[in-house]
Image: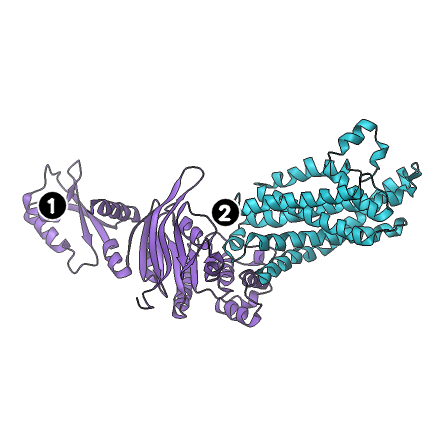
Chain colours: A purple, B cyan
């Protein structure tokens, strides 16, 4: 195995069942590679936060094992945790504390000796240096989020976890955040982020893992996955209701609505041919008159359902 | 041992104390002065002496213990409850530190603050009454151990509490009554015989008695028993905390 493909984090068969009986993770296994940006994509409640909480030591697993550069996160937690920085989803900060104190505290907490020059670098990179003496409560929401990142980076971790880094963040700041993540990657940091936005995963990640109801459905290179996620549907409303589909339209695998007035066509925007032109020509050829056409991106939910169906269909 | 981490927690917690330094110093000074005015001057003038010591002087050790115990509990319980409440506990849990280091940091800071207040009260008391300390080394030992053990108890309460009401509940319903009924302001020999026996079940009696002995050389219970009681209490708190971190009870879930 070359160093480029060596897993920096290895997750083996991780399960988590809460005391309430709810199972948040069903045997998740995943290798995270050194220097990559991996996005864990899934709806709210999919188990993303539970997964990273266990890796980072904030929660305990019911079974399974996680190693960080070979260090078990339970038996050798000191070595494992020292390599990791965590940016939580919620803005959790001591409101009365000046920025510099809270960042200095984070560095010390991770056992690193005080190094004000290094903290200045971190704060400058996050445009927080001018605010270093401000109390956290005086900062804007975006700045608070950057303080969380500064705290996570204060001990120079090799691996950074970002839990929903752009949830509730405006467009401008979201772009800034993406830029920052790319810079960190350029410096060699391995980054794991969770998100429920497809665009975010697309903008940042090298690989994407899709997670739903505690199961990791698929982990693929972004380009491969986006091809699968790039599906759209076109709803064609007809002038006259149709009793059944003409045989000539069979290859398009259209869905006919119950009232016979709507046809739904699924196609792939990233494919070289979407088949739309031919479909419209064939509709006219079959003597069907179109009243209206509407296209929509497949929702994340639909994609999950698709993925689930595919998983189950696998031998 | 991750000493850098311990120091980071300790400094961070002490910074909280120093940010509110006036409140931290002024409130014990004022409340102590009030106790001396009420108990020392008003009531004390009717109680001539307790076992050969003027009543004003007699209440000094109890007064210090009363404040030190309640302060150690409230500072330590708040210190660990607040990160839980606002969510910053995630950072402590994800850091390469073990429970001993976390406890030393938080409990150390709370015990330090309680100790500071104890010393301030002692200094304030000297303005009102004559204070003599017969066994200074034992006095310091009792004071420091009380600060530490009650801060440990506060730490447990802070982890146990799910809301601010629960945070106040144990100090209010258990600790304050035990401390007031533990002989802070009286010698248990002043009680009827039956209550003298009952009061021996109050652990605080042993602490206050031992502490008072270090001042005046007189005690309600044997000094050895006092020391054993406080050692036992400290050990018990440590065992509970060890269990909390081993199981992750009310922190890691």
Q: Position of residue A193 (x, y in %)?
A: 39, 57
Query: The N terminus of chain B is located in which quarter?
Result: bottom right
Please report the residue visible at 68 percent of the width from the left and 47 percent of the height from the top: B149
Residue reaching furthest top? B194
Instruction: Using the image as rendered, state which of residue A78 and residue B131 is in the foreground.
Output: A78
Residue A234 vs residue A220, the one in the foreground: A220
Name the side, left or right, on which A37 lies relative to A108.
left
Query: In front here: A134 or B9?
Result: B9
Q: Quadrant of residue B35?
A: top right
Q: Which residue is mark 1?
A: A289
Relative to A124, residue A77 above or below: above
Label 1's element?
Answer: loop
User: Label 1: chain?
Assistant: A
Between A82 and A235, the one nearer to me in the picture: A82
Nearer to us of marks 2 and 1 is 2
Specify whether B63 is left or right of B101.
right
The answer for which chain carries disc 2 is: B
Secondary structure of residue under mark 2 = loop
Q: Position of residue A104 (x, y in %)?
A: 57, 64
User: Which dot marks residue B252?
Assistant: 2
Q: Residue furthest bottom?
A: A117
Residue A175 vs A263, above or below: the answer is below
Query: Does residue A165 show up?
Result: no
- Neighbor class of circle 2 (other Cα within 10 Å; few <14, some 14-19, many 20+) is some
Q: How many marks?
A: 2
């Amino acid at each position: 195995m070359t160093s480029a493909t060596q897993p920096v984090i290895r997750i083996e068969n991780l399960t988590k069942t809460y005391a309430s009986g709810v199972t948040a993770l069903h045997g998740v296994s995943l290798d995270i590679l050194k220097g990559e940006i991996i996005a864990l994509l899934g709806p709210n409640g999919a188990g993303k936060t539970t997964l990273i909480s266990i890796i980072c030591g904030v929660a305990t697993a019911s079974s399974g094992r996680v190693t960080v550069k070979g260090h078990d996160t339970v038996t050798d937690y000191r070595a494992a945790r020292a390599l990791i920085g965590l940016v939580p989803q919620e803005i959790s900060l001591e409101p009365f504390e000046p920025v510099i104190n809270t960042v200095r505290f984070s560095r010390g907490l991770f056992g690193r000796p005080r190094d004000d020059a290094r903290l200045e670098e971190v704060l400058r990179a996050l445009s927080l240096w001018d605010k270093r003496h401000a109390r956290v409560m005086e900062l804007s929401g975006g700045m608070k989020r950057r303080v969380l990142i500064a705290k996570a980076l204060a001990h120079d971790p090799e691996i950074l976890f970002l839990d929903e880094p752009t949830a509730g963040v405006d467009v401008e700041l979201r772009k800034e955040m993406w830029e920052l993540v790319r810079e960190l990657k350029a410096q060699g940091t391995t980054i794991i982020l969770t998100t429920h936005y497809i665009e975010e995963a697309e903008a940042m990640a090298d690989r994407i893992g899709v997670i739903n109801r505690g199961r990791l459905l698929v982990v693929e290179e972004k380009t491969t996955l986006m091809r699968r996620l790039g599906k759209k549907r076109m709803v064609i409303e007809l002038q006259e209701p149709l009793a059944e589909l003409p045989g000539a339209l069979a290859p398009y695998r259209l869905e006919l609505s119950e009232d016979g007035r709507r046809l739904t066509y699924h196609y792939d925007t990233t494919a070289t041919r979407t088949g739309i032109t031919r479909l419209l020509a064939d509709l006219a050829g079959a003597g069907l008159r179109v009243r209206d056409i509407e296209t929509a991106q497949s929702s994340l939910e639909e994609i999950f359902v698709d993925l689930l169906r595919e998983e189950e269909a696998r031998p | 041992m991750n000493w850098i981490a311990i120091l980071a927690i300790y400094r961070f917690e002490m910074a909280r104390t120093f940010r509110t330094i006036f409140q931290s110093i002024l409130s014990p000074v004022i409340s102590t002065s009030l106790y001396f005015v009420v108990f020392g001057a008003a009531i004390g003038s009717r109680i001539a002496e307790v076992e050969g010591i003027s009543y004003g002087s007699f209440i000094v050790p109890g007064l210090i213990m009363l404040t030190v115990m309640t302060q150690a509990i409230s500072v330590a319980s708040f210190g660990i409850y607040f990160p839980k409440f606002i969510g910053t506990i995630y950072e402590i849990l994800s850091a390469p530190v073990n429970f001993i280091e976390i406890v030393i940091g938080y409990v150390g800071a709370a015990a330090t603050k309680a100790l500071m207040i104890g010393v301030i009260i002692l200094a304030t008391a000297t303005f009102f009454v004559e204070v003599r300390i017969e066994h200074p080394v034992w006095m310091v030992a009792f004071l420091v151990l009380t600060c530490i053990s009650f801060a440990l108890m506060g730490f447990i309460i802070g982890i146990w509490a799910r809301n601010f009401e629960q945070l106040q509940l144990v100090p209010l319903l258990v600790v304050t009554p035990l401390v007031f009924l533990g002989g802070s302001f009286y010698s248990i020999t002043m009680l009827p015989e039956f209550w003298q026996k009952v009061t021996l079940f109050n652990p605080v009696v042993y602490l206050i008695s031992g502490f008072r002995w270090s001042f005046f050389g007189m005690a309600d219970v044997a000094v050895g028993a006092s020391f054993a009681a406080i050692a036992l209490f400290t050990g018990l708190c440590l065992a509970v905390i060890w269990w909390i971190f081993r199981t992750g009870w009310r922190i890691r879930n």
